[in-house]
Amino acid sequence: MRKRELPDLNDPAIMRLILRLALPSVAGLSINAINQVVDAFFVSHYALSAMAGVTLSIPCFMLVGAIGHGLGITASTEIGRALGHGNANDATRAASLALALAIIFGIVVAALIFLFHVPILHILGASGDVFGEAAIYMRILGACAVLVLLQIVCDFIAIGEGNSRFSMYTLIGSFGLNMALDPILIFSFDMGVAGAAWATVISQIAALGAYLCYFRKRLGRVHPALSALRQLKWRPALYPFAKLGIPASSTTVLASVCFAILMQAANVHGTEDELAGLAISLRIVLLAILPIIGFCLGAQPILSYAAGAHNQNRFDAVFKGIVLYCTGFSLSCALIAFLFGDLLITAFVDRAELVEFGGHLLDILAIQIACIGIYQPMVSRFQAANNARHAAMVSMAPQGYIQIPLAILLPMAVGFDGIVMAPALAAVLTTLLAVFLTFSGIRSLPIKELSS
């Protein structure tokens, strides 16, 4: 693999630079969203109970993803620091340790899911056909938790050594294979929800095969190996995974808890069809939300560079550019969801009452879509300016301390509509919080925040 010239983070063509750095990240998360929507498309056409069952299992696998992201973000950070100091051996040791921890945690998680998936589903309110479909899906993917964690960590290792393009290409190939296998396994082999699960497993094996070739052919600067673990001083080596990994996982853990509360409420206040309609609506919302998150992640290094250079004018210009792109995209998607929600739902189901119900849910969720384009760039601003407290306050609000109380109270007060009103209202309140924190501290220069 040919080494690519790294972009100049001080390039005066700010908008072009933002797009150059952000679009690969957008592509990676967008293909993730598309994969989930396509998966929902095939599963919903097999049976609505299957769609509801798959959706009920999401909180459990969000927790698995939280572990992976905690390990991956720590590995990426440690690899970047080590390479920045010119120490490739330390980078290799960090990558090797992250992969070893992924295997250990994966085995533990697989055992826990196998032992406790039945009571977990009962807590979430699953019953009848929905319970059966969810149990099948959880058993298969739970048994393969090691694969999930290894793939996430490998993605972050590639990103940490500056090869985000390989990570993007691997994700696109993996999700593309998943989408191709879905109809074959679900319908041609009549495997139903088990086919959807095995399609995911096979695509993860393919992605790990690509990374195995990548590491064995030494195409990158980091070369994970078992021998690297023997050189570790375990206590100092594990410390960053606790210090960085736990906070990095906390947002996803909160989102998982919140989603579980919403699913439990959906089972209490809704029917199987309404739960399926909710599942479809939430997958459509992901198509708008994940690209925005990807854009902010990709563009954040430019903000961080400007803050580190104490260049307030450039910092402000980059921030305005990110806000411009994100708000424009989110408002456009919100308008489409509000005006054409029924049409979007018809791609998954053709029953008139379910189409109308799903469209109604999208009308409410359009508020959430509109808001994320406003508050997510502000999270990036706080992180770049080294204002961890404000970044945590905003990032943990929409699916954490603001939404969780709403997710408990609103369904009790207004019924099923409260399930989608909770994320919508939480997004509005998060936006108000983010705007207040941003403009109340607008005179606080990044250099002051960094020096503090």
Image (tube, grey):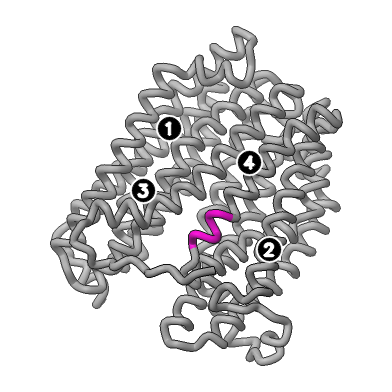
* Mark toward the viewer: 3 or 4: 3
Q: Nearer the viewer, residue 278 or 127?
A: 278
Residue 320 magenta-highlighted = no
Distance of label 1 from label 4 (alpha carbons): 17 Å
Q: Is disc 4 surrounded by few (<14), some (14 to 19) or many (20+) residues within 10 Å?
A: many
Distance of label 1 from label 3 (alpha carbons): 15 Å
Q: Regarding mark 2 in the picture, which secondary structure is present there?
A: helix
**What amino acid type is highlighted by mark number 1?**
Ala
Task: Give the labeled residue for mark 4.
Answer: 260
Q: Which mark is residue 150?
A: 2
Q: Which mark is residue 424?
A: 1
Quarter assignment of residue 325: top left
Q: Is disc 1 surrounded by few (<14), some (14 to 19) or many (20+) residues within 10 Å?
A: many
Task: Give the labeled residue for mark 3.
Answer: 376
Q: Is disc 3 surrounded by few (<14), some (14 to 19) or many (20+) residues within 10 Å?
A: many
**Residue at the far top in the pictured view:** 352
Quarter assignment of residue 289: top left
Magenta-highlighted residues:
164-169
- Image spot of residue 376 (x, y percent): 36, 48
**Residue 424, relative to residue 28: is it above or below?**
above
Distance of label 1 from label 2 (alpha carbons): 34 Å
Q: Is disc 2 surrounded by few (<14), some (14 to 19) or many (20+) residues within 10 Å?
A: many
Instruction: Report the residue at 52% width, 33% height from top.
Output: 409
The mark that comes first in sequence, 1 or 2, is: 2
The mark that comes first in sequence, 1 or 4, is: 4
- Image spot of residue 246 (x, y percent): 55, 66
Q: Regarding mark 1 in the picture, which secondary structure is present there?
A: helix
Instruction: Report the residue at 19% width, 51% height from top.
Output: 439
**Residue 43, relative to residue 223: is it above or below?**
above
**What amino acid type is highlighted by mark number 4?**
Ala
